[in-house]
Amino acid sequence: MPAKFFKRTLITSALPYANGPVHIGHLAGAYLPADLYVRYLRLQGRDAVYVCGSDEYGVAIVMRAMAEGTTPQEVVDHYHPMIRDSFEGFGISFDNYSRTSREIHTDTSQDFFRRLSERDEFVLKREEQLYDPEAGVFLADRFVRGTCPLCGYEDAYGDQCEQCGASLSPSEIKNPRSTLTDAVPELRPTTHWYLPLGAWQARLEDYIDDHPEWKPNVLGQIGAWFTDGLRDRAITRDVPWGVPVPEEIAEAVGVEAKGKVIYVWFDAPIGYISSTREWAAKQGDPDRWKLYWQDDESRLIHFIGKDNIVFHTLMFPAMLMGYGKYVVPDQVPANEFLNIEGSKLSTSRGWAVWLHEYLEDFPPDLLRYVLASTLPESKDSAFSWSEFQTRVNSELADILGNFINRALTFAKREFGNCVPPLVDPSATDLDVIEQLSLFPERIASSYERFRFREAVHQTMGVARLGNKYFNDQAPWATRKTDLVQCANTVHVSLQICAALSVLMEPVLPFSAAMLRSMLRLEGVRSSMSGSSDAGGIGWAEAGSCLLSTGHVRRGKDIKFGNVRANAKYTQIEKKETAN
């Protein structure tokens, strides 16, 4: 269904694991695209809510605790605020950022488990699973490493291969070994709940067939799963850290509940619901979350990386359908992976650019722009510090910053920081004003289709238009020969600056706010969380003349400082030096 037919939109980003800091691969996959989109929606005056939270359960957390000689709770208590603060510093404008260790999430997850159990949506299986005889525990997910059965990578995790991205189960791993003791595991019987996805395949195929507009990379992966045939997916684990399986459900089928937890990939997407519930409670309207999750006029959009496609397009929709009442995802614009300096990003090898470290060196808008310009929307893309430097210098500084600086400086010097009148405009003046009026709709088309790289390019087109116009009109020359035309050039140029202060808001929110402050442009709708008010100057008005004649701006100018080759910006060099 086209977005215009929805009354409201709920946007989610994949919950980051609270077992380490956020890196730029995370940003390019799930967080920056979602933030670009929700800021655009808010500027349009639409009802949009953006939720996320830290994923604090699962084997990865336990392994981090073991490696650090601490407890899982201490691990998540350390990384949750680090992740939250990094997102805030980067300008990711969540309406609510929660954490799955909160009681509201346990309540929501167990409610889902009970509801699906009561509706006989699960199957119970007693089977043999890998067991570490030295540690005395069953080996779930990342407690197992071995050879990937698909690509042959010899150090794949039991739940996923980092080399090929395949989703796996420990029993599929060849030559398995325990990550706890390095022992060769043995098989022992245990009982678990499964979601029989195969029984849902026909309904899920109909659901996917209703969305031919989804990205080819998403549909391609889903098609491969359908071709292979959907299989039962385990939704519980023998792990000491997670949302407990409800005791009464386990007792009813004669299973010992102690030590049984809900599988992290069952409870993690439920985190979107619990975060929305938490948001509604903060608004003083605890039931408001239902408008976004249980109303057919609400649109649900998941922003994720390609490794999470199966969970958000097949498993979670089946859970939502099985529960009843809930809307299902209308869009899942998954991105591919971001590589760094020609190599695959790897947190285990420390080959990453950590967001909190980046923010110590540079303003957030520089990286927002560079990543938005190179998002892996249809295939893997690459980040390098040399390209970072080139894009900041040749695009942000030389195109956008150069135009704004010239226009504002000239207005300050020749017209006392006032917007001069537009008198008897030339055909060129009118043509540029007409071109400017077309940009909001043109850029909006890119955002609506989740083509964010295209949207960034179109936005920079406004600055290119301004630069060409300013150069061609040469106000430094006409100030001596035709003061009226000189004033017209400055008037139109300042209107372009005002348009940029709105249109560049999704990509460069900090710079856009600074530019509006310098222009003293008030009444612009905010793109920040909680600001979907339909009043004021918004996206649709950005192409019109926003500054009135005689308007006095502030004297401060905007600068995008060049990133020099010898500047302290390459964190990879820092890591190599440290090693």
Image (cartoon, rainbow, N blue to C red):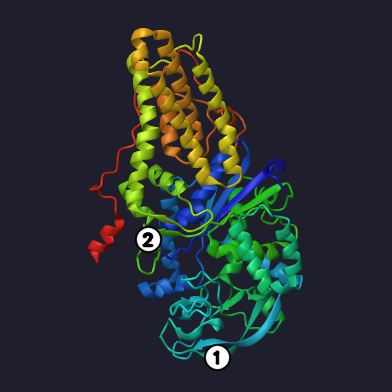
At label 1, counting other C-alpha atoms closer than 10 Å, the crowd grade (few under 14, some 14-19, many 20 or more) is: some
Frontmost residue, 62 versus 378: 378
Q: Residue at x 42, y 30 (%)?
A: 515
Q: Viewed as shown, does residue 348 lie left or right of 523?
A: left
Q: Foreground mark, 1 or 2?
A: 2
Helix, strand or loop at mark 1 = strand
Frontmost residue, 572 versus 417: 572
Q: Viewed as shown, does residue 44 lie left or right of 60?
A: right
Counting from the top left corner in percent of width and height, residue 121 is at 73, 72
The disc, 1 or 2, on the residue closer to the chain's N-terminal end is 1
User: From this viewpoint, is residue 137 visible?
Assistant: yes
Q: Residue at x 45, y 53 (%)?
A: 84
User: From this viewpoint, is residue 506 visible?
Assistant: no
Q: Viewed as shown, does residue 448 lie left or right of 73?
A: right
In the rendered image, which quarter is residue 486 located in? top left
Residue type highlighted by circle 2:
Gly
Q: Mark 2 — residue? A: 342
Q: Mark 1 — residue? A: 187
- In 3D space, how far apart are the residues under numbered discs 1 and 2 (Cα atoms)? 41 Å
In the rendered image, which quarter is residue 52 located in? bottom right
Helix, strand or loop at mark 2 = loop
Counting from the top left corner in percent of width and height, residue 244 is at 59, 72
